[in-house]
Amino acid sequence: MLKFLKGVVGGSGAGLKDLPYNIGDPYPSAWGSWSHFRGTSKDDGSPVSIFSLSGSNPQDGHLAAGRNGVKRLRTVRHPNILSFLHSTEVESFDGSSSKVTIYIVTEPVMPLSEKIKELGLEGRQRDEYYAWGLHQIAKAVSFLNNDCKLVHGNVCLSSVVVTQTLDWKLYAFDVLSEYDGANATATGPMLQYEWLVGSQYKPTELAKCDWATIRKSPPWAIDSWGLGCLIYEIFSGMKLGKTEELRNTASIPKSLLPDYQRLLSSMPSRRLNTSKLIENSEYFQNKLVDTIHFMEILSLKDSVEKDTFFRKLPNLAEQLPRPIVLKKLLPLLASALEFGSAAAPALTALLKMGSWLSAEEFSLKVLPTIVKLFASNDRAVRVALLQHIDQFGESLSAQVVDEQVYPHVATGFADTSAFLRELTLKSMLILAPKLSQRTLSGSLLKYLSKLQVDEEPAIRTNTTILLGNIASYLNEGTRKRVLINAFTVRALRDTFSPARGAGVMALCATSSYYDMTEIATRILPNIVVLIIDPDSDVRSKAFQAVYQFLQIVKQYNEKGNAEDTSGAGSLGISSMPGNASLLGWAMSSLTLKGKASDQAPVATANSVTPATTTASTASSGLIETPSTAPVHRVSSSTDFADQLMPPSPTSTDGWGEIENGIHEEHDSDKDGWDDIEPLDEPKPSPALANIQAAQKRPVSQPVSQPKPQASTSLRPKSTVKAAKDEDDDLWGSIAAPPPKSASRPLNVKTAGAVDDDDPWAAIAAPPPTTKAKPLSAGRGRGNRAAAPKLGAQRINRTSSTGM
């Protein structure tokens, strides 16, 4: 019973087997008779430190002092004092002799002497780190002496340990005792276990056991002397051998020397109070101490101070000791950001510090904080995350991106700020490869469809660029439905010349995804007209694109495989000279505002000018946009400048017509681009109104050569009845037919193949997912039909004279 009670009083456990920790390898040194071991928790494997003290006699004085140390460590709590977790006392028997062992479990720490060797700091960085450590120990000693009226009794190198965040902490409380200076009648020793202290660490009055003088001295007298011994040991790099060595001040920094001498004053009453040392010493005024101190009281600072501090922190961090930055400042900064006390500029500093970590450490210490920040409602934080996403995006796992990051990022697509919409768009280049097909088709493509008609021209341009870059991550069906329509119907018809250029480049970069029929009937006809674009850069890219796609067709024909049209995919040239710009973004939307010459107005029926005039007006900003010519079927004798120009993507062009009721299946509930909500579009121009009226008018049987201005934006019925699902496809409905010419189009079917109910089926491009027949198999070679039935022939010209 006595042993049980003794175990309860002496510790918090019944025995070693009940200790919920595993004892690991020992450290080479520890204070006094204690041994210091590494350890881990049996519950979660978290690291701890385990201290043990053994004695053969239960009444051994070392064990009594050890029990005093356990009691004091458990009850005294301070940020700079070692944190107590658990303790127990075990009695074991070996034959006739018994052995008592006391165990103390604390937070994981390392002896200061070992940590100094491990860090290997030198020069200014060493002095800054020592200043920070001494500052912490001085605060711990001041707390004991001034606030608790306790005397530690043996402050020295051995009584200091270092945590995983490189904080210095005071322990070894075996000698710790209350200061009873107010008891003038007391004659016994004030420090019951002072005999444990080495003689080299004792001030004169303690060495003589002059308790009367000690009681008359201030509470900090003994521990101020010990702090002086600690200063000597860390700067000299060796343990104190005898008291006389303290006179050797060669290694003591000059800024600390006056305070060092006052700490070691021969008169106890004149020794420097550790609280005054903290407040007044010039030595503690350095960048590292100031930075850590600011971070620790960050919640007390106002927003202006925080903003100024965090803007300077990235450059300041480079000047501080790297281990301190990574193990001390980085956790403080991550915690401040996570709990909202740090401003958005702190993210820059966090990522810069994180770049100095290994990939594994970055994932453990930085990424969890960043993922939580994506849920922040602070717009400044969201902007900062998107601006730096290239620095951490690759480290995010696909599951984290799809489930935790993207849902928050996607809110930026509809943000009122154009800057945030653009940053959100650009971030998809990093995040899209990690998204699931469900998210890509069901969410991302919807947002991109709306951004292709954004009011900001640069956002429209960058949307096209993004589509070209992420095409490889889309499944085949989605690519068939989206790419050609996005690039030809919207991008190539945009009034903003860089957007048209981006459309051409995107088509070239994705050339391997198109079959021969799509290239010949849907891509080339839309690109060819851009070779006379008012913008020279667009013309140059159009020429390159025409050459590239003609080369693909030529290689296909040379191969002579009439049965395998899918071979064209392997013959596609994935890139061409100058195509590298596809991977780069267009200029920011903020730099485009106010440039009238960069965004050409839409020509109306009353603004038709000769081609020569187009070239001359290009410099004045009134640029007609020939990139939209593929929408209209024009005879070979018609001047290009006489064509009607369709409106910009922000008005009721191809997408607006579909969304405003021409396409009957616009309510399709498919993924991707099919679920776009109708946009509120302005009233169409008179010319476009005539085109739309002609599109809605019943058609008659063809009787003569087609007129040049007939609209072709009507959606052709599917030539394959089995493809009913494709009829619900919003993208398929806007496929542009090839330009009209006097010669027979390549995809005109024989008379017997024409659907009598749908004259457009004779010339319409096949639906994207329909497998096309080889060009040589009955498509315009040796099988010419008399007077092809072009859809434009069926339009009653008398009702469209306004065109």
Image: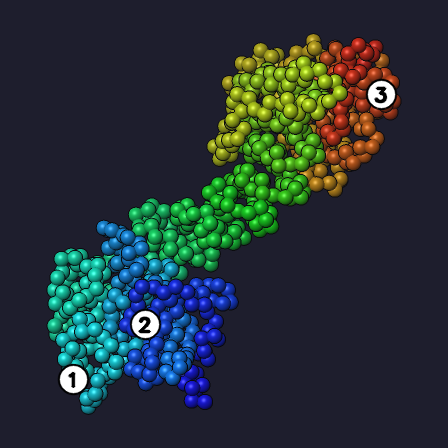
Residue visible at 55% across and 21% down in the picture: 576
Q: Horizontally, is 751 left or right of 428 in the view?
A: right
- Answer yes or no: is residue 90 visible: yes
Q: Horizontally, is 539 left or right of 361 in the view?
A: right
Q: In the figure, 800 relative to 398: above or below?
A: above
Amino acid marked by disc 1: Ala
Amino acid marked by disc 3: Val
Choose top left, top right, bottom left or bottom right for residue 720: top right
Expressed as whole percent of the image width and height from the top left, the position of residue 155 reads 25, 70
Q: Is mark 1 on a helix, strand or loop?
A: helix
Mark whose residue sits in front, 2 or 3: 2
Amino acid marked by disc 2: Trp
* Residue placed under numbered mark 2 in the picture: 34
Quadrant that contains the C terminus: top right
**Where residue 212 is drawn, which disc sits there?**
1
Expressed as whole percent of the image width and height from the top left, the position of residue 251 reads 16, 57
Of the numbered discs 2 and 3, the one sitting upstream in the chain is: 2
- Answer yes or no: is residue 495 visible: no
Q: Is mark 3 on a helix, strand or loop?
A: loop
Nearest to the observer: residue 670 or residue 757: 670
Would you say the residues marked 2 and 1 are in contact, meaning their CB atoms lie under 8 Å apart?
no
Q: In the figure, 241 relative to 449: above or below?
A: below
Q: How far apart are marks 2 and 3 (CA)?
A: 98 Å
Mark whose residue sits in front, 2 or 1: 2
- Identity of the residue furthest to the front in this view: 95
Nearest to the observer: residue 616 or residue 348: 348
Q: In the figure, 517 relative to 592: above or below?
A: above
Check disc 2: other Cα within 10 Å, few if <14, some if 14-19, many if 20+.
Answer: some
Residue visible at 21% across and 64% down in the picture: 239
Quadrant that contains the N terminus: bottom left
Mark whose residue sits in front, 3 or 1: 1
* Residue placed under numbered mark 3 in the picture: 754
